[in-house]
Amino acid sequence: MEVVGINSNDSDYQDEGFNNMVKFAEKYELNFPYLIDDTQTVARAYEAACTPDPLLFDHQKRLVFHGRINDAIDPEAIPKIPIMKNNVKKVLGGQNSGDGL
């Protein structure tokens, strides 16, 4: 499985832009590619509407999940259901995610 982070947030917003991405990646020790989509081309192509907006593709590069990371609506809430993790397990196990599309 491969993970890629793509930041398509407006670089003019506070705490956004490439330099802040570098700081974020270093602070949280990201161990996957973290790319910038400064024209928002990728975000529009996949109808990304929020941050984060996770997408899961199968081994044939087909989009099989577009949804939430977990069930916590409020950023301060404690999540109870790991939605993305559950869908990753399904896809790695050869099942359709069945969630989020």
Image (cartoon, rainbow, N blue to C red):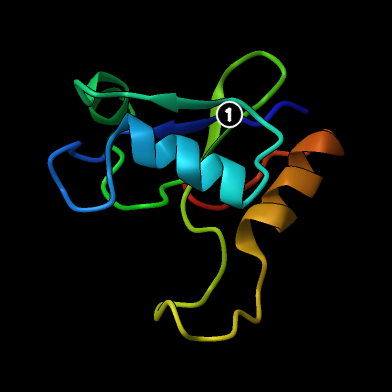
Say whether residue 62 is left or right of residue 60. left
Q: Quadrant of residue 74?
A: bottom left
Q: Residue furthest bottom?
A: 77
Say whether residue 20 is left or right of residue 66. left
Residue at the spot 20% in from the left edge and 36% down from the top edge = 11
Residue 43 point in image, percent of width and height: 29, 30
Q: Residue furthest left?
A: 12
Residue at the spot 62% in from the left edge and 62% down from the top edge = 83
Q: Residue furthest right?
A: 93
Residue 2 point in image, percent of width and height: 72, 26
Q: Quadrant of residue 26?
A: top right
40 and 95: which is toward the camera: 40
Q: Is residue 87 above or below residue 75?
A: above
State the residue position of label 1.
4
Residue 10 point in image, percent of width and height: 18, 38
Q: Secondary structure at mark 1?
A: loop
83 and 15: which is toward the camera: 15
Q: Quadrant of the N terminus?
A: top right
Q: How many marks?
A: 1
Residue 47 point in image, percent of width and height: 27, 35
Residue at the spot 65% in from the left edge and 74% down from the top edge = 81
18 and 7: which is toward the camera: 18
Disc 1 crowd rating (10 Å Cα; few below 14, some 14-19, many 20+) is few
**Amino acid type, residue under disc 1 in the picture:** Val
Say whether residue 97 is left or right of residue 93. left
Say whether residue 43 is left or right of residue 71. left
